[in-house]
Amino acid sequence: MPRVSQDHLDTRRRQILDGSRVCFGRHGYEGATVRRLEEATGLSRGAIFHHFRDKESLFLALAEDDAVRMADVVAEQGIVQVMRDLLAGDSEHPADWLGTRLEVSRRLRTDPEFRARWAERSQQLTIATRERLERQYEAGNLRDDVDVDVLTAFLELVLEGLVSHLAMGLPGDDLGPVLDLVEETVRRHRPGHADPPDIAGDRPGSKL
């Protein structure tokens, strides 16, 4: 029997994750039946569960994949950029990502076993946000009268609020100034000085 290459396995795994993101986003965890997962991925039950032990393992891998991708954006451009991308629809699967994110939140409230498993994987975004804020603090761009952990929690709460707002179908076109305010809230202001330089290189005085 010919040996399957790692590239083929990685491509197939990505196909499953991308298709299941659509399925979970549209139907929720309970509604994402095996038949619907087969339709969304274009693969058979056997092919899907060759890569993932069961549906929960698939969902957990998907949620972790999204968390890692967001953490990468945070490390490079800041957590507010994640929010701006959502408003602009620039994320690869914005609507489906929102659905998955909300399903994670629901299961955290109602499923202790999932909560225990997710706790092991949920720190990437928090760590990336805190590390970026610490770098900005050391560079003198961050306010120094509030602990970095408090600022990290504040920004994560704003992100969760934005996700809920968009997932309810509420308009986001006018929220850009709100995110400007969020950045102004955590930025250090020096009397008699201009705004600090662009923290991510994209827009003057932004990206925390």
Image: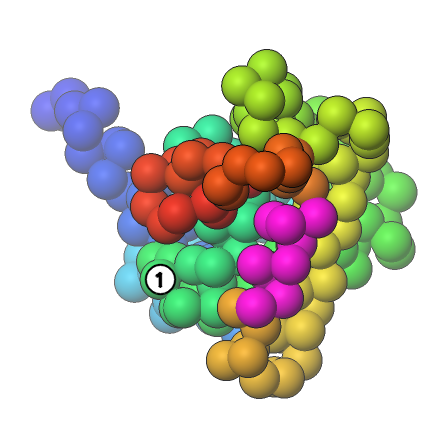
Query: Up-down: is 179 above or below 77?
Result: below
Horizontal and vertical percent position of residue 157 = 76, 51
| Residue that lies at the very extreme toward the top in this rendered image | 138
Q: Of helix, strand and loop, which one carries label 1?
A: loop
Q: Which amino acid, mark 1?
A: Asp
Please give the range of residues in magenta. Answer: 177-185
Q: On the image, which quarter does residue 135 sit in?
A: top right
The C terminus sits in image quarter: top right
Query: Up-down: is 88 above or below 172?
Result: above
Q: Which secondary structure dominates the residues rendered in magenta?
A: helix
Along the line of sight, the residue nearer the viewer: 68 or 53: 68
| Residue under the image location 27 percent in, 42 percent down | 12
Q: Is residue 54 left or right of residue 168?
A: left
Along the line of sight, the residue nearer the viewer: 50 or 119: 119
Horizontal and vertical percent position of residue 178 = 63, 66
Horizontal and vertical percent position of residue 8 = 19, 34
Q: Is residue 121 left or right of residue 193?
A: right
Q: How is the image coloured?
A: rainbow
Q: Is residue 173 left or right of residue 202?
A: right
Along the line of sight, the residue nearer the viewer: 118 or 45: 118
Can residue 30 be seen here?
no
Q: Is residue 118 left or right of residue 21?
A: right
Task: Determine which residue is flagged by label 1.
Answer: 90
| Residue that lies at the very extreme toward the left in this rendered image | 2
| Residue under the image location 64 percent in, 59 percent down | 181
| Residue under the image location 42 percent in, 35 percent down | 197
Q: On the image, which quarter does residue 10 sit in?
A: top left
- Residue 152 magenta: no
